[in-house]
Image (tube, rainbow, N blue to C red):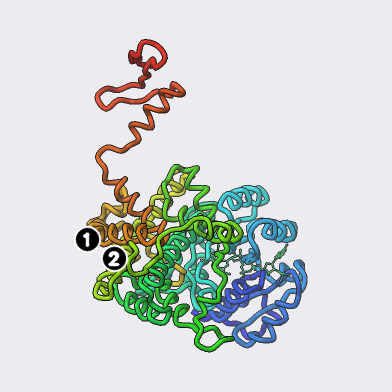
Amino acid sequence: MMRRVSDETTQKAQIGVTGLAVMGRNLARNIARHGYVTAVHNRTDAKTKALISEFGDEGTFVPGYSAQEFVDSLESPRTIIIMVKAGGPTDAVIDELAPLLSEGDILVDGGNAHFLDTRRREAALREKGIHFAGVGVSGGEEGALLGPSIMPGGSEHAYAKLGPILADIAVSVDGTPCSTHVGPDGAGHFVKMVHNGIEYADMQLIAEAYDLLRHGLGRTPKQLAEVFTTWNSGDLESFLIEITARVLAKDDPTQEGVALVDVVLDEAEQKGTGRWTVQTALDLGTPVSGIAEAVFARALSGHAEQRKAAQPVLPGPDAGAEGSGGFVAEADAEQFIDDVRAALYASKVVAYAQGFDMIRAGSLEYGWGIDPGAMATIWRGGCIIRAKFLDRIKDAYAKNAELPSLLLDPYFADAVVQGQEAWRRVVVHSVNAGIPAPGFSSSLAYYDGLRRERSSAALVQGLRDLFGAHTYKRTDRDGSFHVEWSGDGSETQS
Ligand SMILES: NC(=O)C1=CN([C@@H]2O[C@H](COP(=O)(O)OP(=O)(O)OC[C@H]3O[C@@H](n4cnc5c(N)ncnc54)[C@H](OP(=O)(O)O)[C@@H]3O)[C@@H](O)[C@H]2O)C=CC1
Ligand SMILES: O=C(CO)[C@H](O)[C@H](O)COP(=O)(O)O
């Protein structure tokens, strides 16, 4: 719906955006393009001036060159989106704006905040009568402009005003906007954090598939770009697979005939959301092993000095060389490529299942009432993990909202069961070739751990009882038991 107002000088802005780096600038443009009179502000003026001079004709913008001018340019009750660096900078912006706001105003944090910070900020601002909404936004620079996936948290009151604007600017899939109220206080940022954790796991699995085919099979980046393009028309169809093909096809812009991937430093950086996901999962007791392996793989990649020192000291198989355990004959190459595809899909299903388990655990812990099917629905478009199979996840929760694990939905159970022989072959191959595949192997271990009738934890319990009298439960009787290990070896019940 277009609500553009042509006379910007007399018109108060309907919404404001402060923080005009790549995300805030494009979000402000997206909002203005949808007809909202949009106030814009940045700590330093240059970004505000650049936005007005480069994109000022895309909609009606009202620049504010001080916090006071920005706040005064907004109609009451005000709605302001903060889009700055998470952590201290977000607190700094809130501290500057809050004294200038009035009861009933809505302050939105669209950055990648930690959900516990959001809970703290929401409680503090609620005392001042200001509605604070932590809103996850995914889609990167392009998504922010053309339609991101949006995960709004905060009160029902804030959402009543904010929801229609967010639905307007979000991308739509099958006519449904990729934005829905996630739940109160930190729920939106919690779900965005898990989204990013899954993003880490998904990228790690893709990188492992690439590594196995590149160094196990000797395929070139260009050949692999074609493989990923083919994969993108099947079960694996997703934004990340699509852009993997683009990155692998890209030549170094500064050298002819050299693949870009071969000149990019092999040390993955991280801003924090993957690490937060794992830290939170540890607190919730939710095994997100795929995400944890991805975070640790990035950490290991960053230990460049250690890696360099290890190379001459720690030998292993010559990956992919004829005669080595990791050799694949050319006649078996097609089969191997298809095995890697199947292992990637099965591992990916496990990573998403773990992520959705974590959303359920977080929702229970904080009383948010998050609908997992609704999260799958809003992740179908706009966000970094958008993928064809999110439709299947949406359907799985529509059939059974209480699904104990995504892996128990008939479609996903079938996907991992059908893929498991290939999955096992690939993990064995990675071990024999000396090519690390922690994402593939940990997800397979999770699958095997989940399906075991009896786990090795019985022995762990026995050990805990022996060294610390921590007691154990029995399979055949209720109660807690302890063996008098240093006495007569009898069992007592506590
Ligand atoms: N980049 C991406 O793909 C995505 C980013 N996000 C999140 O969105 C938010 C914005 O991201 P992005 O656009 O990349 O920008 P950055 O995270 O690089 O943040 C830059 C912005 O923060 C402002 N800023 C930094 N410190 C302060 C401070 N102390 N007080 C006031 N303003 C400050 C900067 O102002 P100045 O110009 O004056 O330095 C600038 O506007 C972040 O929270 C990020 O995690 C979410 C999804 C995707
Ligand atoms: O939020 C995002 C996408 O949804 C960002 O792109 C994400 O922060 C990137 O994280 P990192 O720098 O840790 O890889």
Q: Earlier in the sequence, mark 1 or mark 2?
A: 2
Q: Quadrant of ligand 2?
A: bottom right
* Callout 2 amino acid: Ala
Q: Is residue 342 above or below residue 115?
A: below
* Callout 1 amino acid: Gln
Quickly name the residue at label 1. 418
Name the foreground residue: 377 vs 478: 478
Crowd band around label 2 with a 10 angstrom C-alpha radius: few (<14), some (14–19), many (20+): many
As drawn, is 292 to the left or to the right of 27? left
Q: Quadrant of the C terminus?
A: top left
**Residue 279 point in image, percent of width and height:** 52, 48
Query: Which corner quadrant of the image does residue 30 belong to?
Result: bottom right
* Label 2 CB-ligand 2 distance < 8 A: no
Query: Which corner quadrant of the image does residue 423 belong to?
Result: bottom left
Name the foreground residue: 3 vs 29: 29
Are the residues tagged 1 and 2 within 8 Å (C-beta)?
A: yes
Q: Residue at x 55, y 81 (%)?
A: 33
Name the foreground residue: 59 vs 213: 213
Q: Quick one: which residue is furthest to the top in this view?
A: 488
**Residue 162 point in image, percent of width and height:** 54, 65
**Residue 5 point in image, percent of width and height:** 61, 82
**Residue 440 point in image, percent of width and height:** 37, 58
Q: Residue at x 43, y 78 (%)?
A: 221
| Alpha-carbon span between mark 1 and mark 2 | 9 Å
Quickly name the residue at label 2. 342
As drawn, is 220 to the left or to the right of 51? left
Secondary structure beneath label 1: helix
Q: Is residue 55 above or below residue 386?
A: below
Q: Does residue 101 appear in the picture of this structure?
A: no
Query: Which corner quadrant of the image does residue 107 belong to?
Result: bottom right
Q: Residue at x 58, y 54 (%)?
A: 114
Crowd band around label 1 with a 10 angstrom C-alpha radius: few (<14), some (14–19), many (20+): few
